[in-house]
Amino acid sequence: MRRRPTPLRRKTLWITLLTLALWPLVSSNTASPTTIVVVRTPTEIYIGADSKITDIRNESITSTACKIRQVDDLFFAFSGLPKIPGVESDLMEIIEEASRGGGTIAEKIEEFDDIIVDEWSKGLQALKEERPQFYKEELKGKIVLQVAFAGIQNRKPVFFMMHLKAVERDGFPAIAISKKSCPGDCQQGKVIAYLGHTGALNRYMSDRSNVWKAGYVQGIRELITLQIEAQPEHVGPPIDILHINRRGAEWVQIKSECPEIE
């Protein structure tokens, strides 16, 4: 079902793509072995996501959720843990806090960096103490959260992608962040980003370059479907797709659990 574009209510539309599910739909025990595909061009952004979420305590417990959601002028999704035991704030609250002071998208992301590094480091320490085996096998040395930020600023699409990795410094858990931006790190103003489980679509893309011949929407559907077929235990339908340009945001493809854009 296609929705009419929603006009921007402010000069800057800030969209956070963080690939997992949403409050209050998931708890701190839920993780999203998700697949997200983002396409950014000089004039628009497309975001596609699968729908499967899994309980990290029991992988046989699964459900579906809308992984691209809106809070005021914010759209968000993510890959990783939405909340860590021992941390009072969840990811949603951290995003809200980071954006509260206003400023440019880059300034909000810097604020988000500062908060998330501090909070998630505390949470990793709590997990190391309470669930040492889980911490060692599932988190230590691995990416615990992938975040992509995108938005329209000064009538142009901007895109940031961030990876948070669990490391140790002096024997204590810590977070190391790596990130890229577009404009900036992308060539010719275009970037295609994959987050979460992406093995099958990476192998597919290494052999083909015509996946976008039928358009970005069809290409996103094809790539996420490939990952669903390759890893049905981790990635699952239906697929949601959001389109953003300087006129606003609209759903291109949406399941019933996803609310309409306000």
Image (tube, grey):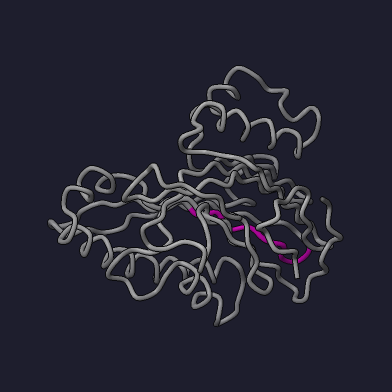
What percent of the width, then of the height, locates residue 240?
Answer: 68, 48
Residue 248 in which image quadrant: bottom right
How many numbered markers are drawn?
0
Q: Is residue 243 above or below residue 137?
A: below
> Could you tell me which residue is drawn at 63 percent across and 32 percent down?
225
Residue farthest to the right, as pictured: 4
Q: 72 left or right of 29?
A: right
Residue depicted at 36% across the width and 58% down the height: 29
Task: Give coordinates of residue 146: x percent, y percent.
Answer: 46, 51
Residue at 39% x, 66% y is: 116
Residue 113 forms part of the magenta stretch: no
Q: Quadrant of the C terminus?
A: bottom right
27, above or below 99, in the image: above
Most extreme residue toward the front is 61
Q: Which residues are magenta?
A: 147-155
Left or right of 84? Residue 3 is right
Residue 131, how many percent across, how many down? 19, 55
Give the quadrant of residue 83.
Answer: bottom left
Q: Name the dominant secondary structure of the magenta segment.
A: strand
Asked if residue 245 lies left or right of residue 64, the reply is right
Pinpoint residue 186: horizontal percent, then vertical percent.
61, 43
> Image check: 90 left or right of 118?
right
> Which residue appears farthest toward the top when viewing the image?
207
Residue at point 66% right, 43% down? 239
Looking at the image, which is closer to me, 143 or 87?
87
Q: Is residue 150 magenta?
A: yes
> Which of these two is toward me, 25 or 249?
25
Q: Residue 32, relative to residue 110: is it above or below?
A: above
